[in-house]
Image: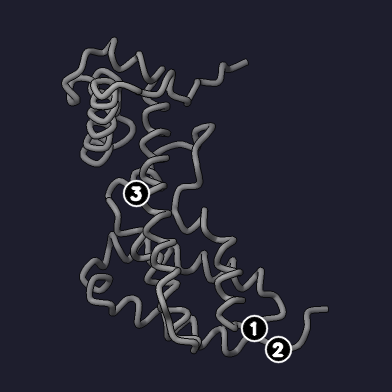
Amino acid sequence: MAVKRRVEPRRRPVQSRSQATVEAVLQATAYILVRDGYARLTTNRIAERAGVNIASLYQFFPNKEAIVVELERRHGERTDAAMMAALVRPRGGDLESTLRALIEAYVAAQSIEPALQRVFTEEVPRLRGRRPATAGERCATGVVEFLAASGVRSPRLDLAGWMLATICREVVYHGVLERPNDTRSGALVDELVGLLAGWLRRAPTRAAP
């Protein structure tokens, strides 16, 4: 039977010197992931790039998988914070304003280190202990509450919320990477608002059986 590799840090840094070592390791990991991909990531390469002794690296992390999980956890905290900050901004009461606030929240989250996010999503295997790959996945349940609080009505609000979160997540994720000019200019947001508003307005109003 295969032995499960540990993906938790050995210990958390307390002293400033230890914290600096861990930060250097994480920054080096991010650099290698973006430049060379997950397949070429090794603890030796990380230590060399970070300028730390390999023994120092192993004081805090048992393997490269644990480093990647910690890096993704911190990245996720930043993207979650960006998304939540966007969702609580004041907005108008109409459907378009509600959708615009939601989509802009996804854009804010996905615009944080998009190249690193791409590696997490497309290259890193489903390691035990990983969080879901995108802020959109982690915040999907909040979309239903967001729609309900904004006055959006649907007999299957849970399904509509899941579909909306999935569409926003995929379009914005690929838009940030493949259509950065349209994303920065707001053109992508405008098109997506129109598309989703038309869909929600055509949603049936009768109660689900």
142 to 20, vertically: above or below: below
Pointer 1 with pointer 3, Cβ within 8 A: no
Type of amino acid at the residue the image marks with label 3:
Gln
Q: Which mark is residue 53?
A: none
Type of amino acid at the residue the image marks with label 2:
Thr
Q: Which mark is residue 153?
A: 1
Compare marks 3 and 2 and give the one earlier in the sequence. Answer: 3
Pointer 1 with pointer 2, Cβ within 8 A: yes
Callout 3 environment at 10 Å: few (<14), some (14 to 19), or many (20+)?
A: many
Q: CA distance from mark 1 to mark 3?
A: 33 Å
Residue sitting at the far top? 55
Q: CA distance from mark 1 to mark 2?
A: 8 Å
> What's the residue at 59%, 82% (across, down)?
152
Q: How many tags in the picture?
A: 3
Please tell me which residue lies in front, 102 or 46: 102
Residue 28 in percent (x, y) is at 22, 31
Label 3 SS: helix
> What's the residue at 19%, 25% (across, down)?
50
- Residue 132 falls left or right of residue 173: right
Callout 1 environment at 10 Å: few (<14), some (14 to 19), or many (20+)?
A: some
> What's the residue at 78%, 79% (across, down)?
208
Q: CA distance from mark 3 to mark 2?
A: 38 Å
The residue tagged 2 is 205
Label 2 SS: loop
The residue tagged 3 is 117
Label 1 SS: loop
Type of amino acid at the residue the image marks with label 1:
Arg
